[in-house]
Amino acid sequence: MFLAIKEILHNKARYLLVVVTFVLIAYLVFFLTGLATGLARNNRTAIDALPGNYVLMSKYANKNLLSSSLTKQQVDKVANKHTAVLGQVSVVAENTSTDKKVNSNVFGINLTGKLKPTVTSGRMPRNNHEVLADDSVTNEGLHKGDRITLNGSDQKYRIVGFTHDRRFYTVPVFYTTLATFRQLKYGQANVANASIVISTRPFKTIPAKTQQINRATLINNIPGYTAETSTFALMIGSMIGIMLLIIGIFMYILTIQKISMYGVMRAQGIRTRSIIAALFWQILILAVVGVGIGAGLLGITQFILPKKMPFYANPTLFSSIAAALVVMSLVGGLFSLRRIIKVDPLAAIGGGE
Amino acid sequence: MTNLVELTQVTKIYGSGRTAVTALQPTDFVLKAGEFAAIIGPSGSGKTTLLTIIGNLQRPSGGKVIINHQDTTHFTEHQRTDLRFNTFGFILQASNLIPFLTVKDQLALVDRFNHHKQHKMSKSELFDMLGITDLASNYPAALSGGERQRVAIARALYNDPPIVLADEPTASLDTKRALQVVQRLADIAHNTDRGVIMITHDTRLLDPVDTVYEMRDGHLKALPNSSLEKIQETAI
């Protein structure tokens, strides 16, 4: 560590470049990760909040919640105390007094049942003309007490409360009664269809033309979800790989420049192990400082980002990405290992005449 | 007087078969404690080869190398590295200092790697002796050739090695400085009972030397004092 620090401090400009490289790559990776997490969460938080891991849906729906529709007979066959019925319909909510239109979902539920969301402000709806909204609608100009129309309905619905982190298919969710859902989806409140049934336990009977999937499958089949997350994963993975190459090559070049100095050190009886330790200490110091500054910059950026931006910093995920960056840069140091091991102390003395 | 270095029939052959080059013919050599030996000879004659074999920087092709009463013939790389650290002080040609360490830190580095915690000379004592106390916070790049060489000597002696090996220690110095450096090496041998071996081209520097050897085409020959004077006269 002594050698590592002394060298960094003596060659500030050179090592500043390495740190700047670390900062930029770390910042980019963190930013992409935050964006990917935010976008993914935009698709799924309402599903993550479902109380059961098992989902019954129409077989034809291709595991896509948006297309599933179960009949009353199918629902009745599986209904028990572990299940709950959910109706989903995509809507446009409009505040007619301000002309604000917001793409959103309606989740029709039994207001006193298992799917009842946590109210963070206001109260639960008490009738078919009240809704509980995901609080992100405030960023879109809808507020508590506003009266909105859904899909241009004549009926107005009042926002009576908010819940938090309930978005599906990238847009916010309005919770209301199953009757309102049926009115919006089927044009009348007295059909008994629903979209899916959620259960905390595996379904014992699977009615005809339905299938059971789990929550993860449901999420992965949200249109565009898997394509989006795998694209981000590829980008982030590539950036970490590029990091390995850049740092590895950088340190390799610096090592080659120091070969004759290492020769002298070997001649003086300093062990190869100590020289290698100095290299990895150096990478560790540069990586931790660089990634740290990158994370700090991201922290600042987070305050500047517009609220509508789907950016989400997950501390656990960010810590593992930071650890991956540091580990990968240490792996990059392996490029230089062979050169250091091959250093010949003889080279220090005229190459052995 | 104990023998610090004992070579018995040591040879070095580079390459093999028809391209083999004998750098060192079978050579016997002894260095006693308190002795200052010099090896002179034209370049390519094998003097550096001999020095590197003594310093355990490379293995001989044949013969026996005994350093400080240990037969190093079958030492592992690791043992040889530790032997170099503990037993030898190397003073090499110019610029064998680590560029990013101050004079003080060149020696502090030795502390870092001194796993055996053996006795060392105190830094201030060494710096005083070599007249580099005022340079302690300078980087090598800020020093003159002579100053650098004195720091290298301090670095070599800091571990209190019984044997000091100097390869052309005066190569980058003017005559006055060169004489000072050689006189210091002589003092080290005579006052502290170390063994010192110096390789040099410069026959003007041989006055303080106890034993002078001449290397020619891999043959090592001790020069009697009379022929030494002749060499010095022709050089002048």
Image (cartoon, rainbow, N blue to C red):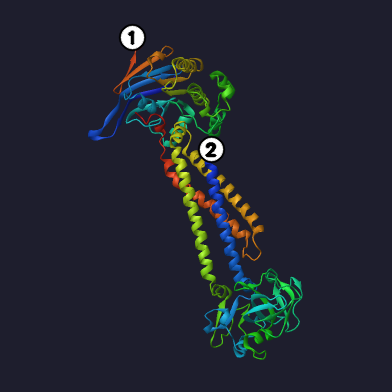
Whether residue A78 appears in this view of the structure is yes
In the picture, the disc for residue B230 is: 1
- Residue type marked 1: Lys
Count how many numbered circles sit on residues in the image.
2
- Residue type marked 2: Asn
The residue that appears at 55% across and 57% down in the rendered structure is A29
Location of residue A308 (image quadrant): bottom right
Q: Secondary structure at mark 2?
A: loop
- Quadrant housing the N terminus of chain A: top right
User: How far apart are the alpha carbons under marks 1 and 2?
Assistant: 51 Å
Q: Is residue B150 left or right of residue A186?
A: left
Which is nearer the eye, B170 or A175? A175
The residue that appears at 59% across and 79% down in the rendered structure is A55
In the picture, the disc for residue A142 is: none
Q: Position of residue B76 (x, y in %)?
A: 41, 36
Q: Position of residue A149 (x, y in %)?
A: 69, 81
Judge the density around disc 2: few (<14), some (14-19), many (≥20) Cα neighbours within 10 Å: few
The answer to whether tags 1 and 2 share a subunit is no
Identify the residue position indicated by label 2 in the image. A11
